[in-house]
């Protein structure tokens, strides 16, 4: 009988430890998620019928992020308009590039704009 009581106590201690460990891991994941979400740059920008190069330059100035692109790729693109409020920068850039044959990817703190292949 004593062995059963000991076994029960031992199992409940393990269960308690597991619950505490799970709670700590969950709290850590939530905190990390909030931290990562705060690192996403957001932008508010309103430009009408503006050259794409000037729009990209405005995005660079507003966010402090680096945008890499080939000037030849954007030279023949007609003027674009953008009206975004508190939008993720990558989404805003993709919105500018819609129907241009270009796409954007994020690498570290840099947005790379390339032709669709």
Image (cartoon, helix red, strand yellow):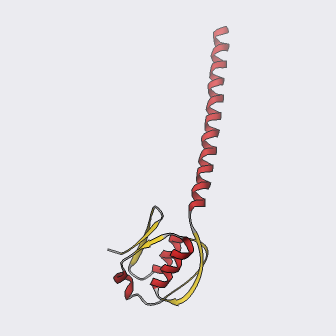
State the quadrant of the N terminus: top right
Is 103 located above or below residue 5 in the figure? Answer: below
State the quadrant of the C terminus: bottom left
Q: Is residue 97 left or right of residue 20?
A: left
Residue 13 seen in render: yes
Residue 1 seen in render: no
Q: Nearer the viewer, residue 13 or 105?
A: 105
Is 9 located above or below residue 104 in the figure? Answer: above
Is 55 located above or below residue 66 in the figure? Answer: below
Q: Residue at x 60, y 60 (%)?
A: 38
Q: Position of residue 18 (x, y in %)?
A: 61, 32
Q: Position of residue 15 (x, y in %)?
A: 63, 28
Q: Position of residue 35 (x, y in %)?
A: 60, 55
Q: Residue at x 57, y 60 (%)?
A: 39
Q: Position of residue 22 (x, y in %)?
A: 61, 38
Q: Residue at x 38, y 87 (%)?
A: 75
Q: Residue at x 59, y 50 (%)?
A: 32
């Amino acid at each position: 009988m004593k062995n059963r009581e000991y076994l029960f106590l031992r199992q409940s201690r393990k269960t308690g430890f597991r619950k505490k460990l799970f709670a700590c891991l969950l709290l850590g994941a939530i905190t990390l998620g909030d931290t990562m979400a705060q690192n996403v740059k957001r932008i508010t920008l309103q430009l009408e019928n503006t050259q794409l190069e000037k729009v990209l330059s405005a995005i660079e100035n507003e966010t402090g992020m680096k945008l890499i692109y080939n000037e030849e790729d954007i030279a023949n693109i007609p003027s674009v308009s953008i009206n975004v409020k508190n939008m993720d920068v990558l989404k805003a850039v993709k919105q500018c590039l819609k129907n241009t044959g270009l796409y954007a990817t994020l690498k570290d703190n840099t947005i790379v704009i390339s032709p669709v292949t």
